[in-house]
Image (cartoon, rainbow, N blue to C red):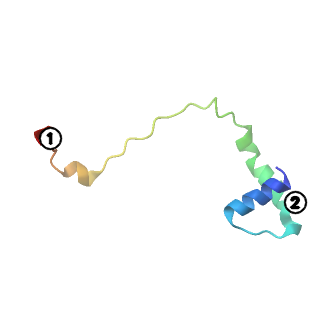
Amino acid sequence: MTLDEVRARMKAAGIEIAENRLEMVRRLLSDALAPIHAVDSRAARTLEPAVMFDAIRSAEPRRDDDDE
């Protein structure tokens, strides 16, 4: 990660970091993100989204839209 990338992330997050601390933040971010960058996301199996139920809506009687 470059210092310009750190500055871009700061701008996107809306935060300010003192110029004399940017190198330390760059190292910390690089170290923290290294395991994520090492993962090949193409090898990860995708999962279907979980089915969600709405208990209140499920309690209502079912309508037949064909009867209009």
Question: What residue type is disc 1 on?
Answer: Asp
Q: CA distance from mark 1 to mark 2?
A: 64 Å
Q: Position of residue 51 (x, y in %)?
A: 38, 41
Q: Position of residue 53 (x, y in %)?
A: 32, 47
- Place residue 7 in its image quadrant: bottom right
Task: Say which of 5 and 31 sits in front.
Answer: 5
Residue at which label 2 appears: 23
Task: Say which of 58 and 10 sits in front.
Answer: 10
Relative to 50, residue 2 above or below: below
Q: Which mark is residue 64?
A: 1
Q: Position of residue 22 (x, y in %)?
A: 84, 63
How many tags in the picture?
2
Is 43 on the left-hand or right-hand side of 5?
left
Viewer-nearest of discs 1 and 2: 1
Relative to 15, residue 35 above or below: above
Task: Say which of 27 and 17 sits in front.
Answer: 17
N-terminal of the pair, mark 1 or mark 2, is 2
> Secondary structure beneath disc 1?
loop
Q: Which quarter shows the C terminus? A: top left
Relative to 65, residue 6 above or below: below
Residue at image x 56%, y 30%? 45
Q: Which mark is residue 51?
A: none
